[in-house]
Image: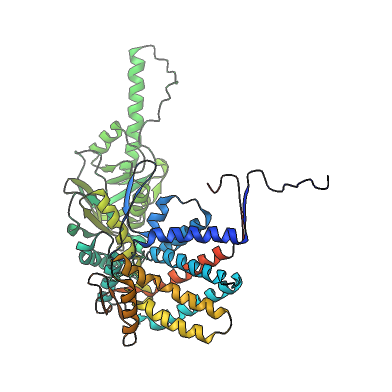
């Protein structure tokens, strides 16, 4: 009895303690960072991801790669969450955050192997992050003029599949963001990217208002409506499905005719309610059947069915229309307004434009590209660019990219580290060393000589803190002159998120996983 084993966890539970748990988690994080790091910078490569359904995504956007990879290892999943958070908060820097976190953990491993306690490493990294943010704020440049915004947008789009048209696309992003700017804020949710495949990226343009990828139900409906009174409904304008098991007793031809007449009356009534509200344009999230289409056409209403929820929300916001879920509630005060709603053919694609909306902030970038893969990839680059431009408008502070600000930061952090006593100093110095991963990876991805160029960069920084690496020529140049500029907020957020993720992983000294959870 005395030696009877006691089970407190279900059979099959896996448990990893202390160093085993840490080693496993650090390895997983390093592997993930290793996967995304080859995509960093303008010379980064793309990844082709194929999901279980066979859908293909080609991207070098860190967050997208990690989202699509369906990662199972818990620590690696924490890094994925960190990248998503970075994307949500600042819209760019997702690859950097994972690469930095992976490198911080690699350096932490070295410290732990040298016998430094985890708590000391965590404390050192935390202090180093705070100091790094302070330094970045000091070296940031005040600028939010249009020229700077353009450079920020171009830098964010570099290497993301749109390089041949990045100046043009950056111009669209900047114009869109400035159009919606109010009191120094730019709410980019007001900007929609509408993708149209089958044309050249250079033909992309900025449209005022909303653009939706739909045509009116019928060719005989108006293709253009001025002074549009817009109804938006989540209510089917069709006869309720008659269940196949429904039994209808019809004993004479008269009864059958009456049944059909009755159906027709019901549909007519539904359409009448729309007509009576005064609407001349209808966007319906549900179906509209043939009979209803006929009456809507007769009433001269421009009607759309099965409109996407996201488009409905956009139309609601832009035109002031109120979504009606029961047709009985439709009345004039629920209608939205737009100066013009019209159908336009682009290449062989029909789009509907809703212009001169009640909310003048609404705008759309109509992104054109040869194939769906091209437009999808560039749409992600545009999203990143919108995020960084909005961040620059809001904060008005930028940093010099291409590795320049990191080299500066490393130098300053080293000086700070020297001033800290005890073993924490070692952690701060390792943290500084870890940040070298950004310029090093930019150089590596460009196929250039890492050792020599890092040495050149450091030497050149004695004279100017704007020196970075031109990955196209392999030269060490002034990155401010080269127009490689990034918002302060992206770098600050990346360091804070990477620091937090590394700390979270380092603090785990026991992993208890349910049966098969880690396989
Ligand atoms: P992230 O997802 O982290 O933003 P990117 O692949 O967009 O990753 O790469 C960003 C890095 O590329 C930044 O460090 C930035 O300074 C650098 N970068 C961007 N454009 C250039 C350029 N023309 N020359 C050198 N570095 C650049």
- The quadrant of the picture occupied by the N terminus is top right
- Whether residue 185 is visible to the viewer of this picture, yes or no, is no
Which residue is depicted at the point 72% across and 47% down? Answer: 7
Quadrant where ligand 1 appears: bottom left
From this viewpoint, is residue 156 visible?
Answer: yes
Give whichever of 254, 99 is nearer the camera.
Answer: 99
**Residue that sits furthest to the top in the current view:** 251
Colouring scheme, one of rainbow, by chain, secondary structure, one colour: rainbow
**Quarter-wise, where is residue 147 in the image?**
bottom left
Number of marks in the rendered image:
0
* Apparent side of residue 73 relative to residue 228 in the rendered image (left or right): right
Give the x, y percent position of residue 226. 21, 52
As displayed, is residue 255 above or below residue 62?
Answer: above
Residue 378 appears at what percent x and percent y?
Answer: 27, 57
Residue plotted at (58% across, 58% down) = 21
Residue 125 shown left or right of residue 207 in the figure = right
Above/below status of 307 relative to 496: above
Measuring from the top left, give residue 183's x and y in whole percent. 36, 74
Q: Is residue 493 above or below residue 61?
A: below
Residue 368 figure quarter: bottom left
Residue 219 coordinates in the image, percent (x, y): 19, 39
Viewer-proximal residue among 162 and 431: 431
Question: Which of 135/275 is in front?
Answer: 135
Residue in the foreground of this view, choosing between 210 and 27: 27
Q: Residue furthest right?
A: 1
């Amino acid at each position: 009895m005395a030696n009877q084993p006691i089970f407190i966890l279900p059979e099959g539970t896996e448990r990893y303690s202390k160093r085993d748990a840490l080693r496993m988690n650090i390895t997983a994080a390093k592997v993930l960072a290793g996967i995304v790091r080859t995509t960093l910078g303008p010379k980064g490569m793309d990844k082709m991801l194929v999901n279980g359904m066979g859908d293909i995504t080609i991207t070098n956007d860190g967050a997208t790669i990690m989202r699509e990879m369906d990662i199972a290892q818990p620590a690696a999943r924490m890094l994925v969450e960190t990248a998503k958070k970075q994307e949500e908060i600042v819209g760019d820097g997702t690859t950097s955050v994972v690469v930095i976190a992976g490198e911080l953990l690699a350096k932490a491993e070295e410290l732990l192997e040298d016998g430094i306690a985890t708590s000391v490493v965590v404390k050192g990294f935390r202090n180093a992050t705070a100091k790094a943010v302070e330094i970045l704020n000091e070296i940031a440049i005040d600028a939010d003029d249009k020229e700077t915004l353009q450079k920020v947008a171009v830098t964010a789009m570099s290497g993301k599949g749109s390089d041949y048209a990045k100046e043009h696309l950056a111009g669209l992003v900047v114009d869109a963001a400035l159009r919606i700017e109010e009191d120094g804020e730019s709410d980019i949710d007001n900007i929609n990217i509408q993708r149209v495949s089958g044309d050249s990226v250079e033909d992309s343009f900025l449209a005022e208002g909303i653009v939706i990828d739909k045509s009116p139900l019928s060719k005989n409906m108006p293709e253009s409506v001025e002074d549009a009174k817009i109804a938006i409904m989540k209510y089917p304008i069709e006869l309720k499905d008659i269940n196949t098991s429904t039994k209808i007793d019809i004993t004479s031809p008269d009864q059958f005719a009456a049944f059909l007449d009755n159906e027709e009356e019901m549909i007519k009534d539904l359409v009448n309610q729309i007509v009576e509200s005064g609407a001349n344009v209808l966007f319906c999230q549900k179906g509209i059947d043939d009979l209803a289409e006929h009456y809507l056409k007769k009433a001269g209403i421009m009607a759309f069915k099965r409109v996407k929820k996201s488009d409905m929300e956009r139309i609601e916001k832009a035109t002031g229309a109120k979504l009606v879920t029961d047709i009985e509630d439709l009345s004039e005060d629920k209608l939205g307004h737009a100066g013009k709603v019209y159908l336009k053919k682009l290449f062989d694609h029909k789009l509907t434009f809703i212009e001169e909306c009640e909310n003048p902030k609404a705008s759309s970038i109509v992104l054109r590209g040869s194939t769906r893969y091209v437009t999808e990839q560039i749409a992600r680059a545009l999203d990143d660019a919108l995020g960084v431009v909005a961040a620059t408008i809001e904060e008005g502070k930028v940093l010099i990219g291409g590795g320049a600000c990191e080299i500066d930061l490393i130098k300053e952090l080293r000086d700070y580290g020297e001033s800290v006593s005890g073993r924490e100093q070692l952690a701060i110095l390792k943290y500084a060393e870890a940040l070298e991963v950004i310029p090093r990876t930019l150089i590596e991805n460009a196929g250039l000589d890492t050792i020599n160029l890092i040495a050149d960069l450091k030497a050149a920084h004695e004279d100017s803190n704007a020196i970075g690496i031109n990955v196209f020529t392999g030269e060490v140049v002034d990155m401010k002159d080269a127009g490689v500029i990034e918002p302060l907020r992206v770098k600050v957020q990346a360091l804070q998120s990477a620091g937090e993720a590394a700390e979270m992983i380092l603090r785990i000294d026991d992993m208890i996983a349910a049966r098969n959870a880690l396989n």
